[in-house]
Image: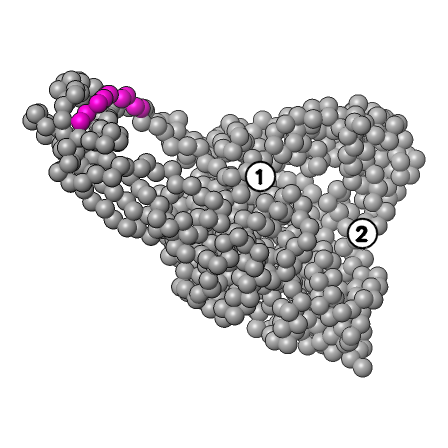
Amino acid sequence: MTVRLILAEKPSVAKNIADALNIKTKKDGYFEGMNYCITWAFGHLVELYDAKDYDGKMRHWKMDYFPFIPAAFKYKVKSNPRNRAKTDGGAAKQLKIIQSLMRRSDVEAIISACDDDREGQLIADSIIYRGGTKPKANVYRLLLNEWTEKEVLRGLENLQSNASMQPLRDAGISRQWADWVIGINLTSVATLKYQQGKSGALNIGRVLLPTLKIIYDRDQEIENFKPEDYFKLAATFQTVNNHEYEGIYRENKTEKFKKKELLEPINEAIADKPAIITDKQVEKKKEFPPFLFNLSNLQGYITNKYKGWTSDKVLKTAQSLYEKKWITYPRTSSMALEESLVGKTAHVLKVHSEDLPYKEEVHFSKTKRVFNNAKVESHSAIIPTYLKPKRLTADEGIVYTAIKNRFIMQFMPVAEYEETKLITKVLDTDLPGRFHSKGKVQLVEGWKKVENIQSKDAFLPSVNKEERVQIIGSDVTSHVTKPPKHHTERTLLRVMETCGKDYQEDENEELLGSILNGFSIGTAATRAETIKKLKDIGYITTDKKYLLCTELGKRLVDTFPVKNLFDLAFTGRLEKALSDIEKGKASKQAFLRLVFQFTTESVATIKQDQDVVIHQAASKRATNEVLGTCPQCGGKVKDGYKAFSCSNWKKGCNFAIWKNDKYLAAMRKKPTKTMVKTLLKEKKAFVKGLTSKNGKKFNAYLSYEKNEEKDYYSWKMEFLK
């Protein structure tokens, strides 16, 4: 009897597949039953060599060693995230399990079930073809947009040859190698050239710098903005029925006047004067719902509406919902659905509308706004699946409700409103201008009912053309032109997504669908990570929901000589080239030649640049002070250069509390010697002044405990009772 081996990207996805196939038997690292073995990765199990792995001399950076471009790129088991000098034990173990399953004599087919994108393709292929060996079994690809039982079973009946995924794999490899070459070379050379002190590095990246430049440019625009005064004349009119409305004086198509003196005589002249409505225009207009969410729009919507949310948090929450089978694939750039999904979508709508108080208004229809193959790039927009979640965390509830509501809106009546424009002429004067008024009346609430969206527009009383009215008040109001606002994650994501293409922030989202596909800064999947990294490395900071350049970020933009890396069009062309490789329209070799040449020239440019200091790194001295006893081996824990770590590390003890610990950094804290001493002695330490995601300060007990299953230490938090 033969079996089929399925490789999933994560344990949770493997469990979803096992559930769909009704497989209950779980072994060490895989499920087995019903003629299937289902195993999993933990995302990437292998990673590219570090420069020092190719050549020992690269352990120490010297200008003469760069540019460094390997003749052949090699992979190793991924490093331990807490100690990069060591291999990740869990990854190494799982890789052995997968390889032993692949070698089994009864395995007649290997099915790659990693995410249907270039990163998922790379994860699976780097494991299946590890070391350049072709497995004896045929390799197939399971391409799914959700992990529900029906979709898993349907997908297993419609497998594709993994060989047909070569363009996707080439795009994944091209992205990975390009970012390695640019990142390793330019970060190293820039740090040597422009940084004083040996702490950390001056991070340079293909997507990092143009994103920084977007924020820098907006900051400069605000800094250089010169406010100007202007004035308006507003009059209040009263109808014969004692209803009131306001009009703004307009002359020669302008209502903003630079000099107050121009309006004051007019204001005096119209006091208590009668007036007449010389024109009335009434127009019925339709308001369509916003398009279905893609990832960037979902991130923008949530981060703008809810305090304390970041794009990275939205992505992680959406990914959790996806892996729990409640939404479709979230890392998409599309705002429409494939036309083949009509029947399935109708079923999903029926499931989610059956309990709605306005269910009679929900009607399924196949429209181009929702179903449009021309607007789908790789993956359809994000929608709920036919499964209703029984329990959601608070964060999951926010993201899930937004996705579900946006989906239901598409099948509600179009909202309709009546827009009225009035022109009022003041009598008994010879004014060249007229007073203009505008108001709206909502006629059909339609899709706005889903989230109870209220109109903020002014209402006008019921009046007719040639009707007489009376001025009962007027005022010259002073105003000041305002600078643009600092970028938020929402506006930054939009600029990254459109590669800086001009748009108005309130412009119809249809613009996005018309932009050249693939021409962007990063991808839907990577933009959140880029914004997070800019914060983590200190190039940008946040002020409430706004993003601002730090002094370090400004100096980098002002000084770093490789200006192409700040150019949105240049980075957009690189991303477009990757998109073309994915579609089989461009070659991996040509793209990599371009990147290698660019890197070589950029290294030369930096070497020849003037000597300036962009970053004065704080010196981190290792005191080697003994802080306590190692809880793992009984050795001495000392204050080292990068970590408070066990002195028996050469004998294999990996206990360490890193000075740049990410868990603590997320709460704006760094481990101190006092904290470490207390942890080692008391097993937990009371830490004051931690900062929540909402920016609030709090205190808590922290302990640093070993996870026996995965062989690493992690933080645990307790609050005062």
Task: Please indicate whether residue 252 sits to the left or right of residue 107 in the image.
Answer: left
Residue at 17 percent of width and 30 percent of height? 469
Please say whether residue 690 is one of the residues in the magenta stretch: no
User: Is residue 565 visible to us here?
Assistant: no
Which kind of residue does numbered mark 1 sit on? Trp
Q: Position of residue 604 (x, y in %)?
A: 49, 43
- In the depicted structure, whether residue 464 falls above or below residue 226: below
Q: Which residue is mark 2?
A: 89
Q: Residue drawn 41% across and 56% down?
A: 413
Q: Which residue is mark 1?
A: 309
Amino acid residing under circle 2: Gly
- Residue at (47, 64) in percent of width and height: 364
Give how far across and how far down residue 403 sits, in percent. 54, 52
Q: Nearer the viewer, residue 299 or 38?
A: 299
Magenta residues (range): 470-480
The Cα–Cα distance between marks 2 and 1, rounded to whole angstroms, is 33 Å
The residue shown at (18%, 40%) is: 464
Q: Residue furthest right?
A: 634
Going from the N terminus, do you reach mark 2 or mark 1 first?
A: 2
* Residue 19: mark in rendering: none
